[in-house]
Image: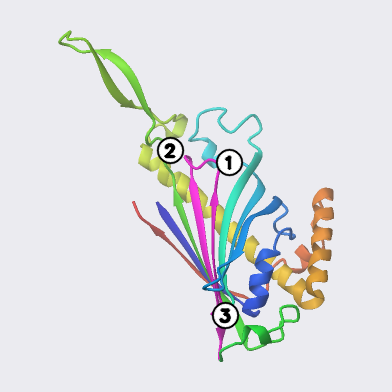
């Protein structure tokens, strides 16, 4: 098992950031996200917290480096397809925080990825949620920090037991013996143990997640800038443009404008637990 943690901040108020989170798809950095559907949403009458469960459908494929460890043909003929991501969120507008959790629903035996985020309002003075404009984000002394923790666990080769009949040497009858199925290994990787293959797969996941988190932050900043400049109408117009650009395969002006990101300060580190 491996852990990846990243801490950064947005130079926007918490109401703006939490709203942008729910409006972040599509954006120029997430055109692989095909659909986002709300499957449950309610406000807890006691805590006044908003609970939401969403299901995202994304284009996805298994990394070529990971395919070397898998049985031939397991990823399909062209190694392309779609996958579902289950996302749950809890927002407390009074205390100024939001918790999120996202997890993959396909290929969990090969690599299970669970991403947890904690967004928190940071301000020199207590903010009144009712006094902060969601659209104009005119509270300049407030920013929002985000702590992202991602857990990677590969179970490839574990729990795959074959039950086969073997005749006992004493001739006393049939005996059921559980034999662990070997993980398919090929070429250069034939000498790797199951644990070694699992760690390698987890490291591949860490590398991909670093890139994904960067694109996620850049996409959020695009949405936040649209929210600041044009309000909800500006965000919806941006969504329309992104859908058109995705259909045409164009990068679009927003992605070029935010090529190097904006308003982000971060710190990241990696932990490993065997």
**The stretch drawn in magenta includes residue 121:** yes
Instruction: Give the residue at x 71% y 50%.
Output: 35
Q: Which mark is residue 51?
A: none
Q: Position of residue 265 (x, y in %)?
A: 58, 75
Pointer 2: residues within 10 angstroms few (<14), some, or many (20+)? many
- Rounded to the nearest angstrom, the CA distance separating label 3 from label 2 is 44 Å
Q: Which mark is residue 62?
A: 1
Q: Residue at x 54, y 80 (%)?
A: 95
Q: Residue at x 42, y 54 (%)?
A: 2
Residue 212: x and y, percent?
60, 57
Of the pair 50 and 227, the residue shown nearer to us: 50
Describe residue 248's horizontal placement relative to residue 224 as left or right.
right
Check contact, mark 1 vs mark 3: CB within 8 A: no
Measured Cα–Cα span from mark 1 to mark 3: 41 Å
Which mark is in front, 1 or 3? 3
For the residues marked 2 and 1, what is the alpha-carbon distance in whole angstroms? Answer: 14 Å
- Side of 7 where 161 appears, left or right: left
The x, y position of residue 30, in whole percent, is 70, 56
Q: Tell me residue 63's x, y (percent).
A: 58, 43
Q: Is residue 229 rendered magenta in the image? A: no
| In the rendered image, the vertical position of residue 229 relative to residue 157, given as above or below | below
Judging by the rendered image, the residue that carries numbered circle 3 is 94
Give the answer, above or below, for where 12 lies relative to 66: below
The image shows residue 91, relative to residue 150, as above or below, that is below
Q: Earlier in the sequence, mark 1 or mark 3?
A: 1
Q: Nearer the viewer, residue 60 or 121?
A: 121
Label of residue 156 in the image: 2
Marked residue nearer the N-terminal end (2 or 1): 1
> Are the residues flagged by discs 2 and 1 in contact, CB closer than 8 Å?
no
Residue lying furthest front: 45
Which residues lie in the magenta part?
95-124
């Amino acid at each position: 098992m491996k852990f990846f943690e990243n801490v950064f901040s947005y130079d926007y108020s918490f109401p703006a950031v939490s709203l942008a989170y729910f409006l972040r798809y599509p954006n120029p950095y997430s055109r692989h996200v095909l659909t986002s559907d709300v499957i449950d949403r309610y406000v807890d009458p006691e805590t006044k917290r908003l609970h939401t469960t969403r299901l995202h459908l994304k284009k996805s494929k298994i990394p070529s480096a990971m395919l070397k460890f898998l049985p031939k043909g397991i990823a399909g003929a062209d190694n392309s397809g779609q996958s579902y991501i289950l996302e749950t969120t809890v927002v407390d507008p009074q205390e100024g925080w939001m918790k999120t959790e996202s997890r993959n629903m396909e290929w969990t035996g090969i690599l299970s990825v669970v991403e947890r985020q904690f967004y928190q309002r940071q301000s020199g003075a207590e903010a009144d949620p009712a006094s902060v404009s969601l659209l104009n984000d005119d509270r300049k002394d407030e920013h929002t920090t985000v702590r992202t923790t991602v857990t990677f666990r590969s179970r490839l080769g574990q729990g795959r037991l074959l039950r086969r009949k073997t005749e006992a040497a004493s001739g006393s009858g049939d005996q059921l013996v559980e034999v662990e199925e070997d993980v398919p290994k090929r070429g250069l990787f034939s000498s790797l143990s199951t644990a070694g293959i699992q760690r390698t797969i987890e490291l591949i996941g860490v590398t991909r997640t670093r890139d994904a988190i960067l694109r996620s932050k850049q996409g959020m900043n695009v949405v936040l800038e649209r929210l600041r400049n044009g309000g909800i109408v500006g965000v919806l117009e941006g969504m329309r443009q992104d859908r058109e650009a995705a259909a045409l395969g164009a990068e679009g002006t927003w992605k070029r404008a935010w090529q190097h990101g904006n308003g982000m300060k971060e710190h990241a580190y990696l932990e490993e637990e065997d």
